Amino acid sequence: MENFEAVKRNLEKRHFEVYLAKSSDDARTLALSLIPKGSSVTWGGTMTLHEIGLSDALKAEDYHVYDRDLVPPSEKQAFVEAHFFSDWFIMSANAITEDGELLNMDGRGNRVAALIYGPKNVLVIAGKNKLVKTFEDGVRRVREYAAPKNAQRFSIATPCKQCGECKDCLSPDSICAQFVRTRLSFPAGRIKVILVDEDLGY
Ligand code: SF4
């Protein structure tokens, strides 16, 4: 994307540590070089992590990997709680504004909770399809695109699952109970961002 450099500068102004990757392969190599061997690593719901082959690569190397995706639903909450304070938490973002803010929605909230506080390092890996011009564009992206696509993966009873559109519902199954706008990384550098010049995830 032509304005990658500008987005990088704007994220850096907000104290994120930012890296650019030309491809999924570059992003995977970069992530492995950033995470020290021996670290404990876990992640939130993210398609991007799997699409770039990072989950398998981490398991093949000397890391303590806690893969929530292998845990049965009845044990997931206890698993997430047990590994919440891992050294590294990996996720994507639902949108990143040109001005350098992150926007994320969540249902239960464990993913955005870890983004805000807990793990020593957060690594956000985002494809160019996540870049939006403004915060309002980001909210639109989440509601009109990311949430309905994501909803198809879960057995929930929300309007976006049923008809593929957001109806601004108050369903107890809502996958967007939380909307988190991350203005900056606090402490500085805790949140690392890899922007990948490919479309990844939703
Ligand atoms: S408000 Fe309801 S319908 Fe809209 S995206 Fe969220 S869960 Fe889906």
Image: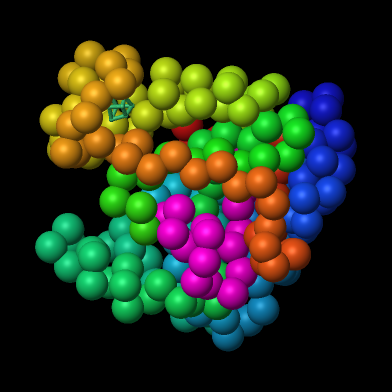
Q: Is residue 180 visible?
A: yes
Q: Is residue 168 left or right of residue 43?
A: left
Tell which quarter ligand 1 is in: top left
Q: Residue 131 placed where, x, y %?
A: 66, 30
Q: Residue furthest bottom?
A: 38
What segment is highlighted magenta in the picture? 111-128
Q: Residue 202 placed where, x, y %?
A: 47, 31
* 199 w.r.t. 110: above or below: above
Q: Is residue 128 left or right of residue 14?
A: left
* 16 w.r.t. 150: above or below: below
Q: Is residue 136 left or right of residue 148?
A: right
Q: Which of the pair 50/117 is nearer the observer?
A: 117
Q: Is residue 127 magenta?
A: yes
Residue appearing at x 38%, y 43% in the figure: 178
Residue appearing at x 67%, y 63% in the figure: 186
Residue appearing at x 68%, y 57% in the figure: 185
